[in-house]
Image: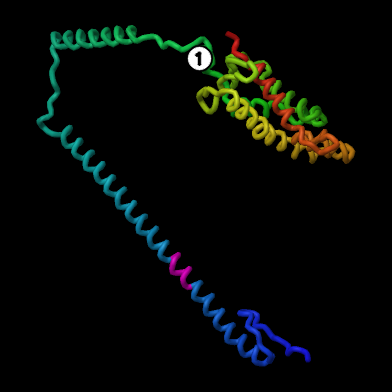
Amino acid sequence: MDSPTNFSCQYCEKNFTNKQNKKRHEKICTQRENTLQENILTQQIEFYKEQLKQQEEQYKEQLKQKDEQLKQKDDLIKELIEKVSAPSCQVIQTTPVKMKQIYDLSMNFTTQNKIVEEQQPEVVYKNKYDKWVYVDCKDALSLVDFLKRIDKAITDEVYDTITMKSYYHKYLYIIKEGFKDLEKNQFPIQIKQNVNGKEEGYIKINDKFEKFYRTDLFEKITKFIKGKMMNLLNSKQSRYMNTEEYNKLQDVDQTYTTASIQGFEDLDPTGKDTREKKIIKLVKYMIDFCMIPV
C-alpha cells in the first residue's frame, strides 16, 4: 500500500498529510516570520539611534572643548593688551654708555656662538659608502621620483615602439630610460656590494635612504618591478588598445602585447611559469648598474 502524500511547510518544513492543514499552518508561520523580521528591524533601528545619540554627544563635547580653548586665548590676548596699555609702562631711555655695553655683550655672544659652532665635531661615517650615500647622494631621486621619470619618458609614441618587445626586454628598456642622463649620485638605488649571496645596498624611499641586505634587497626591487612598473605599463597598454595601431594588429599579436606585460608571452609547452627567472635577471641588472662608484 502506498504511503500517504506529505505536504511540508515552506517556513518550518513541518510535514502534513492534509493539504488544507498545511495551508492553515503556513498562515500562522507567515505571521510568526513577519513578526520576527519586524522585531529584528526594530532592534536595528534602536541600535542605530543609540549610535547617533552617542556621536552627537561626542560632537557636542568636542565643540565645548574648542569653545573653552578659544576663550582662554581671548583672555590671554586681553591680558597682554592691558599690560602694554597700562600707564606704568614707560619707554626705557638708553644712554650711549648703555648702548656700548649692549653692543659689547651682543658681539661677545656672537663670538662665543661662532666658537661653539667651529668646535662641533665633524660627522664621521663608518665607511666611504655611507659617506657617498648620505652626503654625495643627498639630492638623489626616490623610487617614486624615478617612476615619474619613466612615466614621462615612455610617451604613447615610445610605447608603440616597445609594445611587441618581450617581458624582459620591455622592462629593461624602460629601466634604462629611467636611468638615462642621470648622474650616479642621483640614482634611487645605491649598491655597496653585488657579490652573489652577499648583496648589500641602499634604496631611497620617500626622503631618505634605507639599507637593505640580500633577501630584503631583492624583494624590494622585485616589488618595484612587479608592482609599480607593471601598473605603469598596464595603464599605457589601456590607452594603446584604443589606437589604430593596435586595431591593425592580428589577434595573436594583440594578445602578445598584453601577455608580455605580465610575462606570460612565452610559456613553455608544459605551461610552467618562467616569470621568476626573468624578474631575477632584471633585479640583478639593476643591482649591477647601480654600484657605488667609490
Drawn side of residue 263 relative to residue 198, left or right: right
Residue beneath the point at 15% across and 9% down: 96
Foreground: 265 or 153? 265
Quadrant housing the N terminus:
bottom right
The kind of secondary structure element at disc 1 is helix
Q: Is residue 72 left or right of residue 221?
A: left
Whole-percent x, y for residue 137 in the image: 54, 16
Q: Quadrant of residue 246?
A: top right
Q: Quadrant of residue 21?
A: bottom right
**Residue farthest to the front?**
1
Q: Is residue 39 above or below residue 51?
A: below
Is 208 situated left or right of 161 in this image? left
Name the image colouring. Answer: rainbow
Check residue 117 for magenta coloring. no
Q: Main secondary structure of the magenta part?
A: helix
Report the quarter where the C terminus lies: top right
Q: Residue at x 20, y 10 (%)?
A: 105
Residue kind at label 1, given as amino acid type? Asp
- The one nearer the camera, 252 or 125, is 125
Q: Is residue 197 above or below residue 122?
A: below
Question: What residue appears at the point 32 percent right and 54 percent down from the top-left corner?
Answer: 61
Residue at the spot of label 1: 130
Q: Which residues are magenta?
A: 42-48
State how many labels appear.
Answer: 1
Question: Residue 8's spot in the image, x, y percent?
Answer: 67, 83
Rendered image quadrant of residue 172:
top right
Q: Is residue 247 above or below residue 211?
A: below
